[in-house]
Amino acid sequence: MSKVYFSTWKGESINNIGKPEEEWEESAYNLPAQYDDHRDSKAFIGWDGVALFNEDVDVIRLAMEYAAQYQEYSEACGRCAPGRWGGRILYDVLDKIARGEGEIADLDHLKEIGKSMQVTSKCEIGKTVPNPILDLMNHFEDTFLECINEKKQSKHYEESIGYIAKITAPCTDACPSHVDIPAYIEGVRDLRFDDSLEATRQTMPLAHVCGRVCPHPCEDACRRTNLDEPISIMSLKRLGADWETDHGFDFFHPLEKKAPIGKKIAVIGAGPAGLTTAYYTAAEGIEVDVYEELPVLGGEVTVGVPEYRMPWDKYEKDIECVKDMGVNFITNHKVTADDMRKFEKEYDAVMVASGTRISKKVRCENEREEIKGYWGAIDFLDWVNLYEKFDIKTPKSVQKQQMLKQDFVDLTGKTVVCVGGGFTSMDVVRCAIRANAKKVYMVYRRDEKTIIRNTTYEEYHEAVEEGVEFLFHSAVNKITTDKKDVLRELLIDKFELVPDPDGGRPQLVKIEGESYTIKADYLIPAVSQSADLDLLPEEWEIEKTSWATIKTNGKDYMTSRKGIFASGDCEYGPMTIVNAVGQAKRAASVMSRYVLSGEITLTDEEIMEDHLAKLKVYDKKEKITGWLPGIARENSAVLTVDDRKDNNKEVNLGFTQEQALSEAERCMRCYYIAMVQA
């Protein structure tokens, strides 16, 4: 909440004109009253109104500068006259009034044009740009009339004032990588897949990956949801990348690699965060060495995400795209504390993006790693995927511990119980099905809705179709083994949700007398993972979070030691791929400036991203008008259960061209402009 001098944001009516500042009313929204650590905001203006934090704001020039952004960003599609010409007229007339040459008739003209744009523009940017301008004209009419009648300039017309603007969209704001989603959808609609792919790679280099295994939070913030169903955003994203790969084109980079600047960085880990850091820093002319412990590149997406979800040949293209920026990779190198001491001297900065690869325990009775049949999810998925993708055999030590008769993971005739409720656990149970397990259970403390929210609707229902049995509101109480310490049986407790009488979150309470046993051959904990941070020298005393991850401020990703950055799972804990990429993109931007200046700074673009994230761009209560409802969402074809459950063929087949065009046409192109006067 913030005190405001005046606000019409989202329909609120706050007018503190003439009141002493200590009596000013607060806005109900997280408006950016303070722009950054060094500057206060004087005004914020955007698609849903205007807020003034200072009574000295030149409201006429503010309206004029906002109208100018419509031309600056050139995001109007040009398919309608109001959108094509309306914004230009708004700017020209406002500038005329601001420089002291306006007429009374100009006010009527502005209102007429603004209202026409609101009603008849085909895209949201054309509909919404007039909103705050009309608010200012209505509430500060005397100020406009004074300039017109006295033929004088607006009070700050000639002054140098900082106006900082950003284009956004509800889906783009909700995407952790802030991908320009309307742009890549428009590329599909126009059959310009090169444009589509370049729009994605502006902030997301792993286009194949995030077109297949993203939980697509953008779809939860799609304004089309308020009308019928969200756009199938993730499925449209993969089209540009598949088009590039399938046609054998060179990589379509959205930015040209700069000449070498004589600086170099080290990146620890070649997973999504490491690859992203490498891509964008290398593009800035920085020499990049990436160190990877595994014999293969790609991190957990390679060894953790199954082939049926993320085909290796597609992910390999994303990795080659990063290599094409001139990045140097060193595999089979587990970075030690001694390495880090050396890196600090040899490199201008270091990014730790080592992920979280230690499976956490279920915390049940008799839980011990030496039990035969107790198998951590990360290790299980490693050996499944290393064999399926690279024909790397399971070593004798693992075969012996896990009672495997082959040099690969074969679970024929076995009963597998996985504990968890996220993507890792879903990968475990679906891989177990493909390894020919007789019976596969997933034990989860919460309910079906929560597991869908943690993963995706498609992922959960495909697992059910394949034969996975989900035991909700349940937990493993005890492991029973035989005399040879081989897992034989699990005691399962049942729980119920009991409402909190004080109105808090309902509590899970064990149901006495409802516990039961399951005969099982394997228990695979997939409740979470932790980071191995032994690579950090103790004497550095790098701050950690309460979750034993590396602490940063979450904005610039610098650790407590200067020059050492962290992003991805090792910084936040297990997260989605798109979250890791979003963090790493920001960190790469900060690092690129740091190696040149030695200072930590954020760009105006990044500062505005943070403000908009707090403000929330998507309004789930908004009533959508002007669009035809009831146009069905396209769903890409998937392999039938019989065609997929005993192999690793890709399950999701993607859109046909006809489906892609139909789905892209459903996009309402919801661009908005936000602007701060600082």
Image (cartoon, helix red, strand yellow):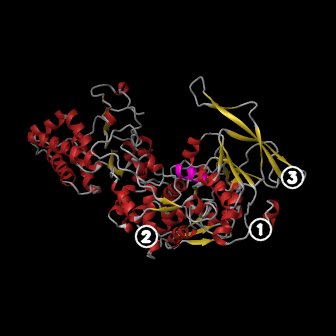
- Which quadrant does the C terminus fall into? top left
Residue 649 x, y percent position in the rendering: 58, 66
Q: Hey, which residue is sitting farthest top in the picture?
A: 501
Q: Earlier in the sequence, mark 2 or mark 1?
A: 2
Q: Is residue 622 left or right of residue 118?
A: right
Q: Quadrant of residue 411?
A: bottom right
Q: Which residue is mark 3?
A: 485
Q: Count neighbours of disc 2 (C-alpha within 10 A) and say few if under 14, some if 14 to 19, many if 20 or more.
A: some
Q: Which residue is mark 2?
A: 243
Q: Earlier in the sequence, mark 3 or mark 1?
A: 1
- Image vertical order of residue 56 relative to residue 36, above or below: above
Q: Is residue 470 left or right of residue 90?
A: right
Mark in the foreground, 2 or 1: 1
Point out which mark residue 9 bears: none
Identify residue type, mark 3. Answer: Asp
Q: Count neighbours of disc 3 (C-alpha within 10 A) and say few if under 14, some if 14 to 19, many if 20 or more.
A: few
**Tag 1 secondary structure:** loop
Mark in the foreground, 3 or 1: 1
Pick whichever, 534 or 458, lies toward us: 458
Identify residue type, mark 1. Answer: Gln
Q: Which residue is mark 1?
A: 406
Residue 459 x, y percent position in the rendering: 56, 52
- Which quadrant does the N terminus fall into? top left
**Real-space Cα separation, disc 2 to disc 1, in angstroms:** 39 Å
Q: Which residues are magenta?
A: 457-463
Identify residue type, mark 2. Answer: Trp
